[in-house]
Image: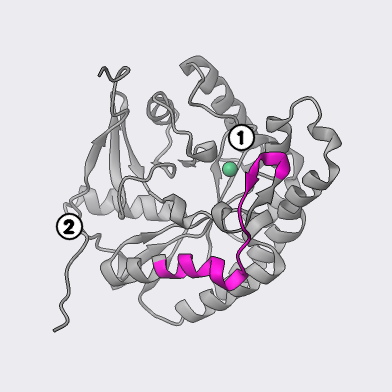
Amino acid sequence: MPFYQSMIQNPVPWPNGAKCACCITFDMDADSLIHLEHPKDGFRRVSAISSQQYGPHIAVPRIVETYRMLGIRQTFFIPGWCMETYPQAVDTILEGGNEIGHHGYMHENPVPQSQDEQAMWMDRAITVFVEMTGKRPRGWRAPLYNFSNHSADLLIERGFRYDASLMGDDVPYIIESDKGKLVELPSHWGLDDWPQWVQSMDLDYMMPIRSPRAGWEIFEQEFEAAYKYGGLWVPVCHPFVTGRLSRWDTVTQFLERVLDRADVWFAPMQEIATHIESVVAKGEFDARRVKIPPYDSAVEF
Ligand SMILES: [Zn+2]
């Protein structure tokens, strides 16, 4: 006999009775990764650079046009250096009404940095962000999910409202540090496109490349579970990966199918975060509260 188990203990009341909230996030890292990984000779790696530049030059205009035709707006996370280097992509994204979030300056890794070092890179990218968009960023995704023990404090001090780097739940939750709190909009590696399709000797990341349909199927199954149980569906995609012609064709067909359902909510991350703040304030959503960082010092054993 079939039964229905409510797998999520604290489902979110999504707007207009939607069953789930969805945002395809694109991290437009472009060739920052090549120069970060190979600071001395990255500039010589012309083929690798061309592969990464496919993102801002070819994929971003294509993706934004798809969103325009489908009538949705989504979120792109972009390192400050990539915004400066590819201003046309920034303009294209903003013209479509999409959100840009903070994603480091050069895709640097905050985890080994001191608090001052991390603050310096974060502020350098915020300066670019304000100059190019006229606004301060509301959301952050740590480069390569490298959220450090200082990240929450630094984000809260700078007025960020949400983070999109952690993996601790199926629905949004609240992260709390000594400085205050942030909305966490979690994702996980099963929703990241690198394990499906990235083969880059220059970045030391070699995966068996799946067909567009087989690679996207994992995202579809994640979507169906979020739809069934009231979760959050936040794929972590990259323009040079999922924005390739055959893969984006597959994603576009998927979007056409699911947007036919009246009860899915596609929105930029900042709108999802604002909704969470609102339903928490009204007592309509019992958000889990998680202390960040989880440990103050090395765990002794
Ligand atoms: Zn990235």
Task: List x then y, in percent, for residue 228.
Answer: 29, 72
For the N terminus, the quadrant is bottom left
- Quadrant hosting residue 252: bottom right
Provide the residue designation for mark 1: 107
Q: At 30% across and 50% down in the image, what residue appears? A: 169
CB of residue at label 1: within 8 Å of ligand 1? yes
Provide the residue designation for mark 2: 9
Q: At 71% across and 43% down in the image, what residue appears? A: 201
Q: Where does ligand 1 appear, by image quarter?
A: top right
Q: Which disc is residue 66 wearing?
A: none
- Amino acid type of disc 2? Gln
What is the magenta segment's predominant secondary structure? helix
Question: Front-most of 202 and 107?
Answer: 202
- Disc nearer the start of the sequence (2/1): 2
Q: CA distance from mark 2 to mark 1?
A: 35 Å
The residue range painted magenta reads 201-221
Q: Secondary structure at mark 2?
A: loop
Task: List x then y, in percent, for residue 68.
Answer: 61, 69
